Amino acid sequence: MSERPIVYSCSGCSSAAQLANHVALRLDREGLADMSCIAGVGGHVAPLVHLARSGRPLIALDGCVLACVRETLAQHGLAPAVQIRLDEFGVRKLKKTDFDPAQAADLYPRLLGRLAAVLRPDEAKTG
């Protein structure tokens, strides 16, 4: 059985960033992925960079077109197995505003669909 993927999320101050962080935390709490710290990867913190380079599939959850998670991984020559930008799912980036919990609840199953092959690779091969 393969190890769970590592999920990294944007966690900036906008509503989109906080929604990305919320989704990553939920994946972690539900045991579907292991969340790690993208700030540590960007800060070149050795144990966190080592984890990112461990060969496990990486998931990048970005809130907007800036794709900070993807770009941070690229600093270390890493590319995510799956990269999701929430703006491509209709999430608007609003400053000084919390994310909409109803939008988060609606979006989560759609994101699980995009992540299915990484979260359950054995099932994806047979389907």
Image (tube, rainbow, N blue to C red):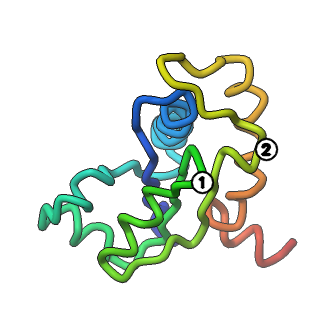
Residue found farthest to the bottom: 77
Q: Which residue is mark 1?
A: 65
Q: Residue at x 77, y 39 (%)?
A: 90
Q: Report the amino acid beneath label 2.
A: Arg
Residue found farthest to the right: 127
For residue 124, side relative to residue 17 (left or right): right
Q: Earlier in the sequence, mark 1 or mark 2?
A: 1
Q: Which residue is mark 2?
A: 110
In the displayed structure, would residue 6 be above or below residue 79?
above
In the displayed structure, would residue 43 be above or below residue 55?
above
Q: Residues within 10 Å of mark 2 (few under 14, many from 20)?
A: few
Q: Residue at x 53, y 35 (%)?
A: 26
In the displayed structure, would residue 115 be above or below residue 106?
below
**Are the residues flagged by discs 1 and 2 in contact, CB closer than 8 Å?**
no
Please state which of the two labelled residues, at mark 1 or mark 2, is closer to the viewer: 1
Residue toward you, 30 or 115: 115
| Distance from the alpha carbon under mark 1 to that under mark 2 | 19 Å
Q: Residue at x 38, y 69 (%)?
A: 73
Q: Residue at x 87, y 71 (%)?
A: 127
The mark found on residue 44 in the picture is none
Residue 48 placement (x, y as % from top left) = 21, 61
Residue 3 placement (x, y as % from top left) = 45, 66
Q: Report the amino acid beneath label 1.
A: Val
Residue found farthest to the front: 95
In the displayed structure, would residue 38 be above or below residue 31?
below
Residue toward you, 75 or 7: 75
